[in-house]
Image (cartoon, grey):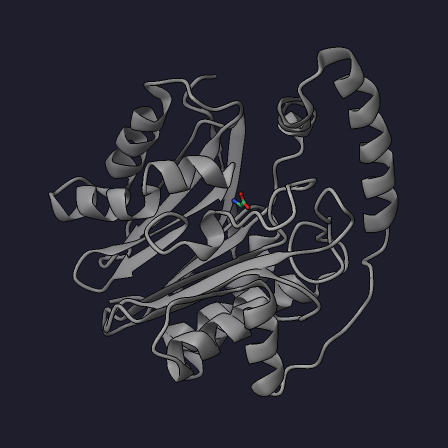
Amino acid sequence: MKRVMVATWDFGFKAVAKGLAILKSGGSPLDAVEEGIKVVEDDLEVLTVGLGGLPNFKGEVELDASIMDGGTLRCGAVGALKHIRHPISVARKVMELTPHILLVGEGALEFALKCGFKQEFFWKPNAREKWVEMLEKIKREALEERSFYGKVLRVMRDFWRETVSVIALDTNCSMAAGNSTAGLFMKMPGRVGDSAIIGAGIYVDNRTGGAVTTGVGEIAVNYCLSKRVCDLMSMGLNPHEACEKAICETLYLKNFINGIAVLALNNKGDVGAATSLKEFTYAYQDDDMDRPELKKIRGILT
Ligand code: GLY
């Protein structure tokens, strides 16, 4: 069995390269996922992931992240976590050190500080400026439309590159998955998205494979999207078929403005993806490759 790493979006390139190097040097899939995601959390050019990125409506950055081990099904997550540089590492501590799965807000911060993480305050370049600019734009247009959050989602339509979501497969078929995001830009304070919800933004089981999402988190939560894709794979669909079917199911009732993407990797190393966004890019690397490759897919409706 070859080692494989996949991750969402162009910035997933760095996560995949780092993660595969860790697998090759004997690290576990959990290490590969965590360290890969940390690279993107630290990247000053990625404003949608990590501390200092694009904030909520009030100008506060609230981070969501989760991690899951495909062998034990153990998992940990944080939601609306402020001031911590690596929410993915706090999620791992939730998995390893607590009897719980999800900690949010103040409780998550308190737990992180007890674990030794440092509280930090900074903006990535341009993040604050983009918030001010968007606030003005939305306020202006919302006054005309009288529907503030509907307007937010429409303004965001072409701005969808948010979560870094990663799946790792090792030579012995052990798997892990994780993700991290600053969440939906201009979200309501306290909103927690799919990235912190096991079964929505992330699911992995060594017996089948894993699936992760990116896009409007509410869709993934509403349709339990990652678990749905894993269930479809366990019924015999290949990752591509499972992703397409699950995305089609999310479109049936037309409840949401904008879309979602799902990326899946089964325990044989086969990959699939589908999206109801205009397009979606993911990074892929296996043992036979020197560097990750970016693969672009078109949206199911385009
Ligand atoms: N998919 C990330 C979010 O909706 O927060």
Q: Is residue 141 above or below residue 112?
A: above
Report the residue at 33% width, 36% height from top: 223
Q: Which of these two is toward me, 20 or 196?
A: 196
Query: In the displayed structure, would residue 273 be above or below residue 101?
Result: above
Q: In screen coordinates, is 122 left or right of 101?
A: right
- Asked if residue 254 is positioned above or below residue 130 in the image, the reply reads above
In the image shown, does 235 or 97 lie closer to the viewer? 97
Residue 263 picture location, percent across and down: 39, 45
Q: Is residue 54 left or right of residue 233?
A: right
Residue at the spot 84% in from the left edge and 21% down from the top edge = 140
Tell which residue pokes out farthest to the top in this image. 144
Query: At 35% from the left edge and 18% from the top edge, which residue is drawn?
Result: 253
> How many badges with numbers are in the image?
0
Residue at the spot 62% in from the left edge and 87% down from the top edge: 116
Is residue 35 something that shows in the picture?
no
| Residue 228 in the image, given as x and y percentages of width and height | 25, 42
Horizontal arrangement in the rendering, residue 192 relative to residue 246 (left or right): right
Residue 251 x %, y %? 37, 22
Q: Residue furthest left?
A: 235
Using the rendered view, name the quadrant where residue 31 is placed.
bottom left
Q: State the image coordinates of residue 59 (x, y, percent, origin top left).
A: 78, 49
